[in-house]
């Protein structure tokens, strides 16, 4: 029996950033729409490709999700080049 892995295909090439907000202390909140968001619940891990040039995915916890509308929101702190690339993402 295979285990359900809803975020295996989550990358910035296949999703749309709906909101991306910076906070004090290099913290960011990012809400995005992706087809896999319809199969998730809040507080699940998202294995996220931050940038196509950085192949290693980052395990981030989503803080909110609305499966019926197909979006998920993550809160993260910039700690290295991968998350720095993620912080540079624009809405759209």
Image (spheres, grey):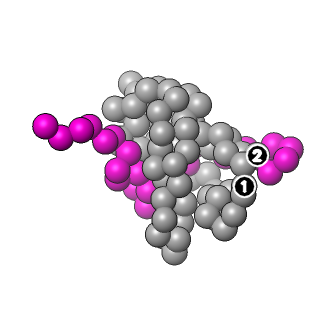
Q: Does the magenta portion include 40?
A: no
**Which residue is found at the position 18% from the left and 41% from the top?**
2
Q: Which residue is mark 1?
A: 78
Q: Is residue 31 visible?
A: no
Q: x, y percentage for residue 37?
A: 40, 37
Side (left or right) of 42 relative to 6? right
Q: Earlier in the sequence, mark 1 or mark 2?
A: 2
Q: Which quadrant: the N terminus?
A: top left
Please say if the residues under marks 1 and 2 sit with CB atoms less than 8 Å apart. Answer: yes
Compute the Cα span from label 1 to label 2. Answer: 6 Å
Q: Does the magenta portion include 13?
A: yes
**Which residue is found at the position 49% from the left and 53% from the top?**
48
Of 39 and 20, nearer the camera is 39
**Which residue is found at the position 65% from the left and 40% from the top?**
75
Residue lying farthest bottom?
Answer: 53
SS at mark 1? loop
Q: x, y percentage for residue 40?
A: 39, 31
Judge whether 70 appears above or below 50 on screen.
above
SS at mark 2? strand
Side (left or right) of 48 relative to 89? left
Q: Is residue 63 visible?
A: yes
Q: Which residue is mark 2?
A: 27
Q: x, y percentage for residue 71?
A: 47, 35
Q: x, y percentage for residue 3?
A: 24, 38
Quarter assignment of residue 90: bottom right
State which region is magenta. 1-26
């Amino acid at each position: 029996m295979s285990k359900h892995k809803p975020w295996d295909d989550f990358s910035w090439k296949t999703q749309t950033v709906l909101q991306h907000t910076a906070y004090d202390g290099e913290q960011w909140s990012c809400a995005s729409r992706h087809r896999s968001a319809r199969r998730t619940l809040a507080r699940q891990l998202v294995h996220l490709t931050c940038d196509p040039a950085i192949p290693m995915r980052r395990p981030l916890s989503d803080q909110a999700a609305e499966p019926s509308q197909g979006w998920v929101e993550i809160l993260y702190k910039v700690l290295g080049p991968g998350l720095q690339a993620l912080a540079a993402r624009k809405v759209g």
